[in-house]
Every structure is written in C-alpha cells, then in structure tokens.
Image (cartoon, coloured by chain):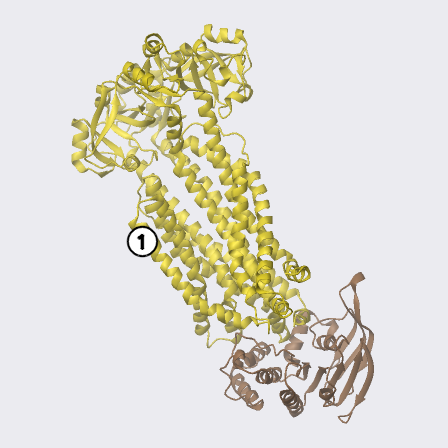
Chain colours: A yellow, B brown
C-alpha cells in the first residue's frame, strides 16, 4: 500500500488509543505470565544443575548404596586394589542451625582437589585445608551463607543432627562462584561428617572420574562392590532427580499459556473493532486503486506492531516478576522434590525469543480473520454494520457445530489415550470448543430473552436485543470471559477436590495421637534416627497404649532412588491405609510374606499392578518382592514403597527408627503425655513432637503452599480476561455512540441510558459466568481424572464445591459491571449532538 | 398559537481555547409567531448546530434559547431531557431508526419515555403508521424497509408523542426527489393538522421554499430572511 493510504489506515488505531493500549496491555500480561513462568522454571532448573554441579563436580560416576551407605573399605579397595586415583569419598547429610537447614558435604581434602571447584588448587589457603583436615567439626561456608546465618570465620556454632547438638567451627569461606545454587552448603572433613551422621566409617557415596575407555574399569569396579551398591553415571543421576519435578513445571507452563490465549482474544477484538470502524475507509481506498493484498498487509502490519509492543512489554514485565515466581517455584520444589536454593531469575535468550514469537505470531494469527474481513470490503460501497452482523450471525451455527465437534474430540482424547500430551490436547479442545460455541449460545440467549420480554416495554426489548445485535463483538468478549472463568472454576474445583481428598487421607492415615521424630526430623531432615533407648522408654510409658514404628529411607537403584517406608503398625483392629487394589489378601501378604504395598503414584510411574513383582537391590543382593496391593497416598508424587519393618530389617542392616506414632490410652491428656515423652528423652536426644492435629494442619499448609503459584497464575489469567471484556464492551459502546445519542435525543435521561448500558453488560457477564460453570466442571473432570492422573498418578473423587461456581458468577457480573460503568458514564456525559455529529 | 421561539446573543464554538472554531457569535433572532420554519444554508453554515441547540441536544457557551418562554440554557440536564421528551420530535437525514426494534417498537419508545398511558399507545402507533402510509408495517424491522419508508417511519416517530415542535435535519438528504417531496409534504401536513410547529434545516432551496419563514444562514450569520411560501 502506498504510504499515504497506509497512514490513513493506521490512523484508525491511533484514533482510539485507549482501546489499542488495553489490547497491548492484555497481550503483554499474557506474555508476561508465560515469560515469568519460563524464567522461573529455567531458574529453578539452573539452580538445580548448579547445585548438582557443585556437589558432583567433575565426577563422571557415583558409587551408591542403600540407606546404610557404603563402608569405608569399599573406597579403600577401589584405590588400593584397582589403583583408582580419581576417586573421592563423600558423606552427605542435613543439619539444622536455628531456622536454617545446612547441607553438609563431608569430603576427604586429600582426595578431593581434582573434583569440585571450591576445592580446586589455590581456591583455599593451605592453612584452611590443614584445619579442615585436622580439627574435628571444622567447616567451610560460602561467604553469603556465613553472612546470612551470622557466623564469622573462627567462630564456633551449634547445629542439631539426629536430635543431638554438635559444635562446628567456621574455618574458612568457600568460593561463591563454585557453590552457586547451593548457598546452604557446609563443607567439612569426612570424619566430622560421619560423626554428625552418627555413622562412623560409612560413606554416602564415592565419586569417580573415569577415562573414556571406561568399560573395563567399570566392570572391575562392579566386581568389587557389595551387592546393594551400584555404579551410575553422574549425568543420569542428576537427570533422574531433575525429572521428578518435570510434571510440576509442565503444568505451570500449560497454565501460563492459557493467559497468552486470553491475551490473543484481546488482540483479535481490537483488530476486529478497528477493521469494522474503518470499513468505509477501506472501501474508499480500494475504490481509488489500493489492492486487496495491500489492505491485508496494512492490517497485518498493524497487528505485528501491536504484537511486538505487547511482546516487548510482556518480556520486560515477565523478567521483573520472575524473581517472585521463582521463589514460589523454588519453595514448592523444596517442599515436594529436592533441596535447591534458587538464585537470581535471569532472562535467557530462549525465554526472550519465545515471548517475542508468542506475542508477534499470536497477534498476527488472531488478526488474520479481521484482516481478511478488511480485504473483502467492497470498493463500490462501504457496507453498513447491519449486513456484517447478519453475516456473522450466519456463521454462528457453523462455529457452534465446530465447537461441538471439538468438545466430542476432547471426550475421545480423554478416554481413548493414556498419554499426558493427549490430556493437554483434550484440555485445549475443551476450551477452544466451548469458546467457539459461546457466540451462538449468547445470540440464542439474547433472542430468547427478547422473546420472553415481548410483552414488556420497548426499552427492555431494546436492552435485551442489544445483546445479540452486536454479536460479532459481544460473542468474542463473552467467549474470552468464559474461557478465563471456566479455567478459574476448573482449577478451583480440582484444587478443592484435591484438598478434600488430602484431608480425608490425612484423617484416615494419621491415627496416632503424637508423632515423634528427632528434633530436626520435621524440618525436611529425614535421614536422622531416633535413639533406640529413647524409643524403648517412650513405648514403656504408662500413658502409651501402643506405638507405630517407621523408617523412611531412599534405596539407591541405579541412577534413581526408591523411597521406602518400612513400618510396624500396632494391631488396632482397623487399618489406617486405604487400599485401591489387592483387597484383604494384600494385608495378609504384607503381614506374612516377602511382599510390599506401593503407593498409587509409585504404581503409576513404574507401571506396577497388584500381583507384579518389584526388584530392589539389598545388601544381600537384588531381591524380588511381590506387589501385594496399591494404596492411596498423597504424600509424594514420586510414590513410596511400603514394607513391613521386620522384612526391611531382614534384608537391610539398618535398625534405625525415623519416627514413632504414639497411641495414648483412652482419657490420657495430650499435654501430660507430651511432657512425659520429653522427660524420658531429656539429656539423651532432643525430640520433635507433633500432636495429630498439628501434623494435619502443617500438612494442609504445605498443600496450600503448593497451589499458591497456581492461584497466582489463575488470577493473572482473570485479569487478562477482565481487560478483554472491558475493551470489547467499551468498543461496542463506542460503535453504538450514534444510537445512544439518538436515544438521548428521543428523551432518554442520562441515568436511563447508563442503566441500560450497565444492564446489558452485566447480563453478558452473568451469562459468561453461567456458561463457565458447566465448562469449568468439565475442565475439572479432565484436570482430576486425566491430567492429575497422568502427570502424578493420583486419583481422587470429584467434589462439587459451591464457592468456585458462585465465584464465577460473581466475577462475571462484577467484571461486566466494571466494563459497563466507564462507557455508561461516558455516554451519559456526552452531549447527544456530539454523538449525532458522528453521522 | 404556534410555539414562540427566540434566540438571544448566542455564542457557540466547536472545541475550546486556542482551537476554538466559532460558529455563532452574538447570534440573535426571534421567529415570527406563525407557521413552519426552514433554515437554509450551505455545509458549515451552522444550520445543523442551530437545530441541535434548539432541540437541547447541545448547549451554547453563552446566550439564551427561549422556547415558549423557557430558556433551555437554564434547564438542568434532566429537565432539558424531560422538555425534549415531551415537547420535541426529531427527524434526521439518516433516519436513525433503532435497528434492533421493530417499526412499531420504534414508535412505542417515545410514548413509553413520555409516560403515555399504556392503553392508548398501540392505537396511537397504528394511527400514525396509517397516516404515513405504512399501516401493517408495525412488525417489520428497519432493515426490511426502503429509505423512503424508513424516513416515513422516522416522521411518524417524531410525531407519535404529540410534540409542539418538530425539528427535521436534512430530512430529504438521503432520498430521491420523489420520496423527498413525499416526506416534506407529510411533515407539513401532519404538523399542520395538530397545530404543531415545524422547523427544518436544509441546503435545498426547493425544500426551504415549502416553509412559511426561511432563514438563510451563512457562516453563522443570518444573511437573508423571507416570509411566505411564495419565496
């Protein structure tokens, strides 16, 4: 198109700067959410990689073993018998210092130097190495960690491990660069770490650096290892750990994409509005020789500019809020998956490009229909609005049919396939299908209301008729709002159902009155054990009727670990665990045979069913255990293997007890019993005690925290939808300014006019809220029975909660009220003559 | 007795401040107390603005617009609306029928707004539609009518609530000559029947010549004034 004609066309965008600005803002918000989630996910992944790098260093392989770890002799054997010089023993554990959890890495300073960056030659003064090697309890901290916890070099400080106090001395500071992603790292000599762990002469793992022609060396190492130990590539172990959180980060990305989709509705609306307003102009331009292609390019160029502005703004804003999101992601990862200290949120080139592509390509795609519309304007005469509405009206049944087909497709995808990708495709088909059906439903509802008010005043009929009259605009606005509200309803119902399921599960599973662990045991430090003498004293207390005894361990099985929960439950005549498969026979097998129960997510991730066998490495060699049953467990999405304590002790040389569940005799006051338990442990081991009620409360608090980020994303999506409806309805009223002026000329008061506009928009909002209810319920079914089941392996019952449904209606009404107030106020304020001048 | 109309020292300009474009400066005119009025002028002469001011659709910056002794400029927005609702009917160049309402409903709307008793509304609508030659069209929608028919509906709508003053802004501007003549005849006939006053704005000398008083406007000033249909 020639520049002057182009300028004439582009002036339409600038004529309604607020409208264009709101569209840019809406899409920018969508891009912001997507970019922020991407940066947060990448930041968490980077922090994880850095921490793995800092901990594993240049190790190519790890030798790992069961819960009891490896004996010192294994390391000695590797060096002496195989002559492996590049081998380093490691002891890892967590300790508590005040409210902080420090990750202790015990190393052998003499074997260490070539492995980890912080131990490289020259990184620390020889005097510091000497102290680390010779002084019991000497540790190194990163400068930032030392500053945060308030410990200075040379200062001694007390930490808690296994409920016992230990004194450590800070003898030097670690290189910050080499410990990025691990700012809670404390490095100490291996002997000090073994003492902290209460496991002398045992190692957590041995790191190896093997050359490329490693096959023979690997064979030789394997031959030397005890049965429960294995050698695994360092990268495979890191990948296996990182993949634990894969489903969580994928869900966040899917949710952030929803905000972008709603933002695209906004761009579509704005471009459509601008094309409609300029139909006459396009007609004139075509009449004087501008080609269809030039019109198409002009409109697409405008969309490109809007999209680029939105993408740039969204990327900047996303980068700005990513830090907060990263903190939320990091907290959830820490709560559920692995210990990681998330650092700075950094915008990567990949996030930047993704945001840009999403904003620009999305904007172009959503402007395509309006651009084609502009291209088709007849050069003979600029078509009036009414014929367009009629044409749009003609498309509605077709669109609704396409929507119905997509909805059917969503059902087929949900039922026929078992993949997570198919689940997300079903979710997308449900939302798009509903959005396509919304304009037809809106028009039909408007027409039905019009028929209902046939005997009512003409003003009512006009108010109700106005709903379907501008369907080319209202339909899209309502569709955007329905998508956002149904997502809100769907996610709220899913989270609500999940919460009810977790509550029920906690109620049935947590039966003991008091839970006892070592003092640090409730703070994420699980490897510590209770003193057997303390356990015996507690069991013998007169107030105690029975105890359940549990041991939580991670069994190294190649590159991955298997969470094992060994338990001895008191015979209370009723099992506290709900079996989903296996029936009563499962309990008999569990109690008497070499059988285990696996949690639902574990069975799902490992494709296990009742009757299968599970092979686990034990100190007596690999053993097969029958999977007697599958039980409901919401404690971990990795899943857990549950074993009889006696069976565990039979195969693993570990008499440790991680926790006790204390059942009190009827009528025994909780406070007195708690005091008695503390009294018997006094001087022997510091205990962490949680009453049943408190443990349930804390568990639910962790659950709520996990979904905090979902809540944040949900509300950001609603905000984008609010912008969509405000701009759409605002545009509609702008288009109707002449008609509104006419009504004023006929004698309508400003108040009557304002009420009419507000009534129309509120009706639209309430209608969107109503439509969002069934769509939201369908969405929650997909989230519960398809996405949750396929991503995490959890099943749960759907609970229809009233509050999300009422919330959808209230938000729909309130949003529309908000959208109606400004144009109502503007129309009422405007002199009728100004509106009629628009002729 | 026709409705007395007087314009006193009117100042009106588009926009304000440095960008102000004056339309009327100290404009004065008292219409003779008889018959229909035509305001004739070229585009930009201020004739449509004058009509909007007389309808109370816009307000001058200074001066008075007196209709039947009442200064519109002193009325509050709601009083002005009530005044318009009860005493003024309007016809526009582009018909301005409400597309979402049927022809009958378009006529009912002013009656509802004016608070006409429910029982008498339907009969009044039927009568008016018959008078403009569109009996039986009540159920149709504006888009189903020709331009001439739409303007006849607009004429009927302007009279349905029995206003004392009918203001018509280029009522023939969108019509062919035959339809235009028919509309002008209708306007004169129907206003004369019930003793109403018609004020029409036009750029056509032929249309203006049908009125009993003709004001010729040029750049916001009265350049000529005639009385009598024979002009």
- Nearest the viewer among A40 and B192 is A40
Q: Is residue B110 left or right of residue A677?
A: right
Residue at x 33%, y 26% (from the top left corner): A515
Does residue A606 appear in this view?
yes
Residue at x 80%, y 75% (from the top left corner): B220
Q: Is residue A730 above or below residue B219?
A: above
Q: Residues within 10 Å of mark 1 (few under 14, many from 20)?
A: few
Q: Quadrant of residue A736?
A: bottom right
* Chain where mark 1 sits: A
Residue at x 50%, y 33% (from the top left corner): A43
Instruction: Give the quarter of the figure containing the N terminus of chain A.
Output: bottom right
**Image location (x, y in percent) of residue A397:** 41, 67
Q: Is residue A643 left or right of residue B67?
A: left
**Image location (x, y in percent) of residue A749:** 62, 70
Instruction: Give the quarter of the figure containing the C terminus of chain A.
Output: bottom right
Q: Is residue B126 above or below residue A500?
A: below
Seen as rendered, the residue at the extreme bottom is B230
Q: Is residue A75 left or right of residue A819?
A: left
**Image location (x, y in percent) of residue B140:** 50, 81
Q: Which residue is mark 1?
A: A412
């Amino acid at each position: 198109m020639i520049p002057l004609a182009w300028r004439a066309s582009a002036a339409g965008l600038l004529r309604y700067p607020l409208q264009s600005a709101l569209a840019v803002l809406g899409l920018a918000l969508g891009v912001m959410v997507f970019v922020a989630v991407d940066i947060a996910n990448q930041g968490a992944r980077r922090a994880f990689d850095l921490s793995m790098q800092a901990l594993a260093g240049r190790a190519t392989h790890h030798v790992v073993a069961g819960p009891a770890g490896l004996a010192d002799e294994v390391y000695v054997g590797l060096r002496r018998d195989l002559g492996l010089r590049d081998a380093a023993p490691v002891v890892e554990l967590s300790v508590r210092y005040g409210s902080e959890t420090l990750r202790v890495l015990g190393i052998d300073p003499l074997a260490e130097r070539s492995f980890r960056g912080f131990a490289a030659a020259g990184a620390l003064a020889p005097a510091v190495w000497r102290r680390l090697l010779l002084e019991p309890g000497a540790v190194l901290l990163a400068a930032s960690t030392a500053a945060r916890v308030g410990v200075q070099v040379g200062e001694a400080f007390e930490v808690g491990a296994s409920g016992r106090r230990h004194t450590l001395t800070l003898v030097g500071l670690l290189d910050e660069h080499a410990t990025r992603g691990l700012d809670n790292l404390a490095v100490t000599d291996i002997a000090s770490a073994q003492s902290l762990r209460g496991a002398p002469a045992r190692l957590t793992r041995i790191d190896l650096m093997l050359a490329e022609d490693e096959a023979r060396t690997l064979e030789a190492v394997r031959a030397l290892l005890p049965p429960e130990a294995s050698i695994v590539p360092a990268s495979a172990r890191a990948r296996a750990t990182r993949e634990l959180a894969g489903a969580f980060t994928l869900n966040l990305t899917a949710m952030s994409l929803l905000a972008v989709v709603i933002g695209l509705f906004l761009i579509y609306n704005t471009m459509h509005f601008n094309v409609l307003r300029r139909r006459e102009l396009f007609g004139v331009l075509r009449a004087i020789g501008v080609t269809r292609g030039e019109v198409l390019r002009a409109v697409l160029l405008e969309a490109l500019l809007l999209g680029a502005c939105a993408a740039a703004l969204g990327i900047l804003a996303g980068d700005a809020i990513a830090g907060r999101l990263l903190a939320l992601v990091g907290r959830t990862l820490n709560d559920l998956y692995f210990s990681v200290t998330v650092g700075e949120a950094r915008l990567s080139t990949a996030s930047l490009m993704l945001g840009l592509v999403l904003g620009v390509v999305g904007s172009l795609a959503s402007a395509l229909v309006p651009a084609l519309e502009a291209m088709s304007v007849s050069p003979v005469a600029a078509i009036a609005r009414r014929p367009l509405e009629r044409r749009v009206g003609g498309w509605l049944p077709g669109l609704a049919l396409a929507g119905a087909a997509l909805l059917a497709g969503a059902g087929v995808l949900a039922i026929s396939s078992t993949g997570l990708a198919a689940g997300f495709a079903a979710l997308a088909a449900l939302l798009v299908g509903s959005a396509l059906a919304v304009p037809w439903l809106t028009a039909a509802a408007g027409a039905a209301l019009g028929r209902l008010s046939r005997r009512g005043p003409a003003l009512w009929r006009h108010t109700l008729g106005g709903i379907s009259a501008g369907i080319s605009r209202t339909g899209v606005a309502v569709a955007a709002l329905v998508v956002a509200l149904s997502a809100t309803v769907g996610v709220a119902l899913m989270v609500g159902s999940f919460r009810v399921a977790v509550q029920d599960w906690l109620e049935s599973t947590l039966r003991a009155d008091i839970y006892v662990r070592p003092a640090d045991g409730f703070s994420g430090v699980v490897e510590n054990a209770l003193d057997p003498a303390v356990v015996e004293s507690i069991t013998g207390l007169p107030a105690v009727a029975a105890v359940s005894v549990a041991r939580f361990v991670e069994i190294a099985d190649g590159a991955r670990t298997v969470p094992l929960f060994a338990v001895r439950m008191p015979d209370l005549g009723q099992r506290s665990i709900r079996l989903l498969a296996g029936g009563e026979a499962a309990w008999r097998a569990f109690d008497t045979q070499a059988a285990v129960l696996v949690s639902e997510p574990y069975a799902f991730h490992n494709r296990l069913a009742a009757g299968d066998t599970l092979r686990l490495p034990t100190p007596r060699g690999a053993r097969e255990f029958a999977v007697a049953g599958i039980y409901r467990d919401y404690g971990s999405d990795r899943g857990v293997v549950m074993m009889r304590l006696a069976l565990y002790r039979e195969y693993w040389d570990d008499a440790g007890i991680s926790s006790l569940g204390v059942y009190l005799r009827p009528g025994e006051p909780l406070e007195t019993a708690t005091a008695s338990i503390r009294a018997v442990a006094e001087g022997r081991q510091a205990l962490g005690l949680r009453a049943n009620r408190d443990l349930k409360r804390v568990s639910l608090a962790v659950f709520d925290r996990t979904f905090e980020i979902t809540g944040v994303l949900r509300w950001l999506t609603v905000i984008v939808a609010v912008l969509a409806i405000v701009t759409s309805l605002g545009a509609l009223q702008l288009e109707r300014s002449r008609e509104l002026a006419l009504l004023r000329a006929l004698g309508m008061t400003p108040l009557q006019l304002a009420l009419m506009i507000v009534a129309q928009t509120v009706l639209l909002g309430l209608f969107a809220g109503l439509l969002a209810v069934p769509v939201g319920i369908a969405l929650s079914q997909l989230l519960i029975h398809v996405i949750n089941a396929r991503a995490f392996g959890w099943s749960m019952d759907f609970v229809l909660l009233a509050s999300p449904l009422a919330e959808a209606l209230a938000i729909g009404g309130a949003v529309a009220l908000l959208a109606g107030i400004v144009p109502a106020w503007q129309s009422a304020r405007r002199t009728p003559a100004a509106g009629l001048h628009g002729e | 007795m026709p409705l007395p109309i007087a314009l006193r020292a009117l100042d009106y300009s588009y926009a304000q401040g440095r960008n102000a474009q004056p339309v009327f400066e100290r404009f004065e005119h008292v219409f003779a107390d008889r018959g229909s009025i035509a305001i004739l002028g070229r585009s930009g002469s201020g004739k449509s603005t004058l009509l909007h001011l007389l309808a109370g659709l816009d307000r001058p910056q200074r001066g008075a617009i007196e209709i039947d002794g009442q200064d519109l400029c002193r009325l509050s927005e709601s009083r002005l609306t009530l005044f318009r609702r009860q005493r003024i009917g309007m016809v526009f160049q582009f018909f301005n029928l409400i597309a979402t309402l049927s022809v009958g409903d378009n006529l009912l709307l002013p009656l509802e707004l004016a608070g006409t008793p429910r029982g008498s509304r339907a009969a009044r609508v039927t009568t008016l539609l018959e008078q403009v030659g569109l009996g039986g069209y009540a159920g149709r929608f504006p888009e189903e009518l020709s331009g001439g028919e739409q303007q006849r509906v607009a004429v009927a709508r302007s009279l349905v609530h029995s206003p004392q003053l009918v203001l018509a802004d280029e009522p023939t501007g969108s019509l062919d000559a035959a339809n235009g003549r028919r509309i002008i005849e209708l306007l004169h006939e129907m206003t004369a029947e019930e003793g109403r006053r018609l004020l029409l704005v036009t750029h056509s000398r032929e249309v203006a010549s049908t009125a009993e008083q003709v004001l010729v406007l040029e750049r916001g000033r009265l350049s000529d004034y005639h009385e009598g249909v024979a002009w």
